[in-house]
Image: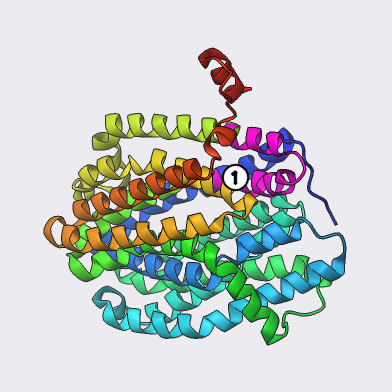
Amino acid sequence: MNKIQTSLSKIDLLAVYLPYALRYLYPLFLVPYYGRILGATGYGVVLAGVSLSTSIWVFVNYGFSTVGGREIVHTENERDRDSIFRDQFTARLLLCIPAVLIGTIAVCRSDLLSRVPGAGFFVIAGGLLAAFNIGWYFTGTGRARTSVLIEVLGLMLSLVLLFTFIRKPADIDRVFPLTFASSLIQSLLAYWIVRREFSGVIAPLRAAVNLIKRSTVIYIYSGTAVMMLVASTYILSLLALPSEVSAFGVSERLIAAGLSVMAPAAQILAPKITFLVARNEAKANLMGRRAFAVFFLGAVGGVIITRLFSEWFVPLMVGPEFRHAVAVLNIMVFVLPLCVCTRVLGMYFLIPRKLERLLAWSGIISALVNLAAAIPLAIHWGATGMALARLLSEGSLLAMLVIGVWRMGLLREILGINNEFSLPTRFSRWLE
């Protein structure tokens, strides 16, 4: 079994990011294809389904991946890893029951999804399947490259299936079954690789319930916030026209693609930083600061490029009928730097220190801000209003996290500065 290496391996990062290039390009191929083949109305159906499926996935996952990854990096033998794996699987099974009920109600309430035969079943099934992804197990045991390669294979298969069988607007009923089929093959491959590393998948009920309790605080932070954000498209489908849903969905997909660039680094850095916090906190902080510097500069660059070229890029990519998405994207792009700040603070500084309570309260309040702002703004301004609601939510989350870190006395430690340092020294310390 591979062990976590405490050094920042550039080879590991390169190995993760090279295959990730396809994952990043995936929506850039798929969004224009959906937009041109299915049209604004058809693509609105796809976006509503993806939003609901992702919400189910986030609920059933329930923060388990974060807890599992954090626990498994400290294990020393196969018995402990086996116990963690079975607890994780059983806890997810328990949450599938309410997820199916909630998903069924949501499908019945959505005019967009209920009009497509079979869409509801595959939307729900796809969300449940995604929740059983074991990428956390691969990365926690030092095999991030294996996890990414499996995911890239699934993306390639999905593209081949969709490009082969989706040729006209009437093929909308094939989208969700094809996506589910590619995800199923990807999951079967992952479980086949690790089949000899665990003795079973069912744990005692008490152990699974205990895992749910231990994961609740993390879920309240990451789960509720993410669920409210990914559910924005579904909520908008209940309040606005399909054209507004597609305009917001295109913008949300592009912003999500930009933010997902952080995922491969997190697969490598999060286990390392978690491992180092108890052993070499200064080195852990340094890794976190470097990650922030790289991604924040990239986010600022993304804002500038989007504002300069969105009027040309969006119609070229998805067609002239999506021109009204330009204004929405120009607002949504400011989410990028805010999300970089909140994700780096949470993933690289607070979760490794087990400060999930701050994250939980911040997540609850930001989710409430998002919901309170989304409904009136979406009713009056459609997709533009939903984009403003997301911006308000992410801004409130960042403000609460910064205030919380400052009150705990961790701000100077995270920044790597001391009172006796001059400003030039502080700047060099940040970049060292």
Which of 192 and 415 lies nearest the eye of the viewer? Answer: 415
Q: Is residue 317 magenta?
A: no
Q: Is residue 187 left or right of residue 178?
A: right
Q: Is residue 406 left or right of residue 193?
A: left
Residue 258 in sight in this render: no
Residue 273 in the image: state x and y as whole percent.
Answer: 68, 44
Residue 307 in the image: state x and y as whole percent.
Answer: 28, 32
Residue 338 in the image: state x and y as whole percent.
Answer: 39, 42
Looking at this view, name the residue that lies furthest to the left.
380
Q: Is residue 42 left or right of residue 416?
A: left
Q: Image height check: is 190 above or below 401?
A: below
Q: Is residue 124 left or right of residue 243?
A: right
Q: Quadrant of the N terminus?
A: bottom right
Residue 105 appears in which quarter of the rendering? bottom left
Q: Residue at x 53, y 49 (%)?
A: 346
Q: Residue at x 67, y 86 (%)?
A: 205
Q: Image height check: is 281 above or below 52?
A: above
Looking at this view, name the residue that lies furthest to the right.
77
Q: Count every numbered label the image shows and give the total.
A: 1
Q: Mark 1: give few (<14), some (14-19) or many (20+) Cα within 10 Å.
A: many
Check disc 1 and give the amino acid type.
Tyr
Residue 299 appears in which quarter of the rendering? top left
Q: Is residue 279 magenta?
A: yes
Q: Quadrant of the C terminus?
A: top right
User: What residue would you read off at disc 1?
Assistant: 348
Query: Mark 1 falls on what kind of element?
Result: helix
Part of the protein shown in magenta: 260-289
Which of 35 and 83 lies nearest the eye of the viewer? Answer: 83
